[in-house]
């Protein structure tokens, strides 16, 4: 059974991006941007796209978004941007990964790292969108 958010959190943690459920350093979570920890990475699943008429693929498309929030201030912004860049580099080009028994094929970035401005506490937010096949 595919559990995209859970599996991407585990994959990012296994590759040194942060700690799944961590409360210090870079914590990686599923679904929601929490108020703490401040330095947080969140994986959210979105619907897959429909096939174009010329596409012949085996599998189902999926999309997911990764949100990175850093500490307020220039150093926090730089650290959050660097963390978002690390995630982008890890997953950007047709990567296939297996987590537990599920394989996610052709994962690739569909956006560059995007600056989302700041939250109400002036903490910087960056995001990246990815797609792939089950």
Image (spheres, rainbow, N blue to C red):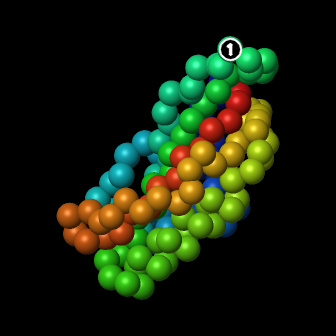
- Residue 34 in the image: state x and y as whole percent: 33, 54
Of all residues, the one furthest to the left in this rendering is 120
Q: Is residue 26 above or below residue 132?
A: below
Secondary structure at badge 1 equals loop
Label 1 crowding class (10 Å Cα cut-off): few <14, some 14-19, many 20+? few
- Where, quadrant-wise, is the N terminus in this rendering? top right
Q: Residue at x 76, y 39 (%)?
A: 106
- Residue 22 in the image: state x and y as whole percent: 48, 62
- Location of mark 1 (residue): 53
Between residue 128 and residue 70, name the one nearer to us. Answer: 128
Looking at the image, residue 4 sits to the left or right of residue 76; the answer is: right
Q: Residue at x 57, y 35 (%)?
A: 63
Between residue 91 and residue 18, name the one nearer to us. Answer: 91
- Residue 49 in the image: state x and y as whole percent: 57, 25
One can see residue 81 in this view: yes
- Where, quadrant-wise, is the C terminus in this rendering? top right
One can see residue 20 in this view: no
Specify the quadrant of the image occupied by residue 76: bottom left
Looking at the image, residue 22 sits to the left or right of residue 1; the answer is: left
Looking at the image, residue 90 sits to the left or right of residue 4; the answer is: right
Of all residues, the one furthest to the front in this rendering is 54
Specify the quadrant of the image occupied by residue 39: bottom left
Between residue 27 and residue 126, name the one nearer to us. Answer: 126
Looking at the image, residue 67 sits to the left or right of residue 9; the answer is: left
């Amino acid at each position: 059974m595919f559990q995209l958010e859970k599996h991407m959190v585990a994959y990012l943690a296994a590759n040194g991006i942060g700690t799944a459920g961590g409360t210090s350093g870079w914590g990686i979570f599923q679904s929601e941007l929490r108020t703490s920890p401040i330095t947080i990475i969140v994986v959210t699943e979105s619907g897959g796209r429909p096939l174009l008429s010329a596409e012949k693929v085996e599998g189902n498309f999926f999309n997911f978004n990764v949100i990175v929030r850093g500490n307020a201030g220039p150093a926090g912004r730089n650290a959050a941007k660097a963390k978002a860049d690390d995630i982008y580099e890890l997953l950007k080009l047709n990567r296939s990964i297996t987590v537990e028994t599920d394989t996610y094929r052709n994962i690739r970035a569909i956006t560059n790292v995007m600056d989302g401005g700041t939250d109400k506490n002036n903490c910087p937010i960056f995001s990246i969108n990815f797609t792939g096949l089950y």
